[in-house]
Amino acid sequence: MTPQRRRRSRPAFTLVELLVVIGIIMVLISILIPVVSKMRKTQQTASSKAQMSRIQFAITSYYNDFLAYPGALSNKDLAGAPPLAQLTQSEDLYVALVGGWTIKPPSTALTFDASTLGMGPMNFNPNPAAAGRKNAYIENRAGESTPLVSGVTKPIAQVPVLEMSYVKDTEIPEFLDQYTSPRPFIYIRANPGATKASATNKVVSAGYQPDVTFDFNQALAYSNGSSSAPPDKKDWGNKPDANDPAIINYFTSSISPSDQARTARYAGTYILIGAGPDQIYGTADDMIVGGGGG
């Protein structure tokens, strides 16, 4: 008879060893998640800044053609009575650069037509030979503007994935930043009659005033200040008015060491605002560019 072989016992993890391994894995995950999140946020910030640069270039090209900053409608009209008062300058910027306005005879009024998005702005020259559309000043890229829902443009307040609830809004798209929860770039065109006034002589007002540089209501149209957002998530603090020192400082820059004299940022041109990584307007990480001059 052959001797019976003994079975070798397999080495196995003890419960303590298994718990130690699981603990190490959890520690590594807790270290990696913030790093990956920070890297993603950094990449999104870089993409958003690059997008702002493209918009700036398109605005400059538009200005070179028309000797005016983008927008088919005047600041006064956009701040006036409905229906134009429902539009924002940010929406007017989009259709001015990308296309979307059309005139359908016999009416002579501007009408938004989503089928013309990307075809470029209309040329309103009364000479029929010069009429038609110019090429778009910026490419109509998917993911960089308010998305279509079932092939239809909707106000951003009606696009659930954006989680936005702004009072002034139409189905006209806006340029969106590139963060996970995107927010529009706010465009405020300086009033033509405004000058580089000091902060004490009105640089920003809540509503259209021809001698004041910026209409703060154009920014408040995208504010969560009156929503159910928690205090640390409210845009522009607690939705202050245009006389609030924080708002004056936001739209002006110092021209003296003592900070007593201030001048409007980008007076005579425009200001383009991105909410930045924290996705809250009016905070230190906001991305702000303009046409120079202040």
Image (cartoon, helix red, strand yellow):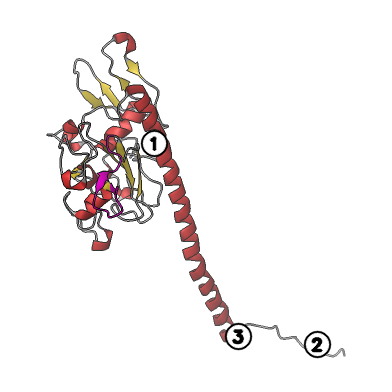
> What is the x, y in percent for residue 128?
29, 9
Q: Residue furthest right?
A: 1
Residue 142 quadrant: top left
Residue carrying label 3: 14
Q: For numbered disc 3, what is the local secondary structure?
A: loop
Residue under the image location 57 percent in, 86 percent down:
16
How far is the residue under mark 2 from the one under mark 1?
Answer: 82 Å
Look at discs 3 and 1 and give the one toward the viewer.
1
Residue carrying label 1: 56
Q: Residue furthest front?
A: 257
> What is the x, y in percent for residue 262?
25, 47
Amino acid marked by disc 1 = Gln
Which quarter shows the N terminus? bottom right
When the figure is inspected, residue 65 is found, relative to residue 157, above or below; the finding is above
Residue 189 quadrant: top left
Residue under the image location 32 percent in, 45 percent down:
273
Amino acid marked by disc 3 = Thr
Q: For numbered disc 2, what is the local secondary structure?
A: loop
- In front here: 234 or 162? 234
- Magenta-span inclusion, residue 188: no
When the figure is inspected, residue 265 is found, relative to residue 39, above or below; the finding is above
When the figure is inspected, residue 11 is found, relative to residue 255, above or below; the finding is below
Q: Which residues lie in the magenta part?
A: 253-268
Residue carrying label 2: 5
Mark sitting earlier along the chain (3/2): 2
Look at discs 2 and 1 and give the one toward the viewer.
1
How far is the residue under mark 3 from the one under mark 2?
Answer: 26 Å
Look at discs 3 and 2 and give the one toward the viewer.
3
Task: Determine whether, in the image, residue 204 is placed left or right of residue 178.
Answer: left
Mark sitting earlier along the chain (3/1): 3
Label 2: how many residues lie within 10 Å, few (<14), some (14-19) or many (20+)? few
